Image (cartoon, grey):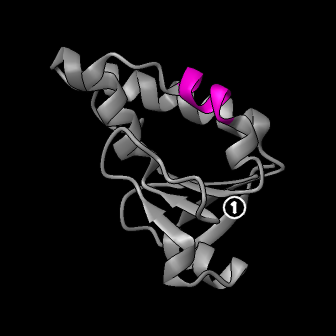
Amino acid sequence: MVLIIGGAYQGKLDFAKSTFDLKPADIFTCTGGEIDFSRRCIDHIEEFTYACARSGVDAVAYFQSHREQWRDSILICRDISAGVVPMGADMRSWRQMNGLTCRYLSGEAARVSRIFCGLEERLK
């Protein structure tokens, strides 16, 4: 599995498309609490973790229980850990859930890339 992380609008998906020759049909964009693991690339993991945090689902446990389905995937997640700590408990919960999920996924990944200004920084 490949994990691609970085801030908003830094070119994570464009990097994945060019590096891994992804077509639109290869990409699933998370918008809630379900993931279509049949696609090669899962984008916006942070939207999934947001839905999990709001509904009380453990995103890490979800990924652990579906490991065989994503082990060959390209996963893309926005880094929401930088900046001011949110005042609202729900947003802090999301930030924590997203961080824990990225930490788990980076441990499982064969390759971890951070994208900043469209440039790759290989972390693993």
Give the residues in magenta: 60-66
- Relative to residue 54, is residue 39 drawn left or right? right
Label 1: state its secondary structure: strand
Residue 117 in sight from this viewpoint:
no
Residue 2 in sight from this viewpoint:
yes
Residue 97 sits in quarter: top left
Residue 54 sits in quarter: top left
Residue 120 higher or lower than 109, as above or below: below
* Circle 1 crowding by C-alpha within 10 Å: few under 14, some 14–19, many from 20: some
Q: Report the predominant secondary structure element of the magenta stretch.
A: helix
Q: Is residue 19 magenta?
A: no
Residue appearing at x 33%, y 37% in the figure: 83
Residue appearing at x 15%, y 19% in the figure: 88
Residue appearing at x 64%, y 35% in the figure: 66
Residue appearing at x 36%, y 59% in the figure: 8
Residue 87 higher or lower than 66, as above or below: above
Residue 11 coordinates in the image, percent (x, y): 48, 73
Residue 47 coordinates in the image, percent (x, y): 34, 45
Number of disc labels? 1
- Relative to residue 35, is residue 60 drawn left or right? right
Would you name the residue on which mark 1 appears?
121
* Outermost residue, left side: 88
In front of the other: 89 or 118: 89
- Relative to residue 106, is residue 93 drawn left or right? left
Residue 34 coordinates in the image, percent (x, y): 41, 42
Q: Amino acid at mark 1?
A: Glu
Residue 112 coordinates in the image, percent (x, y): 72, 52
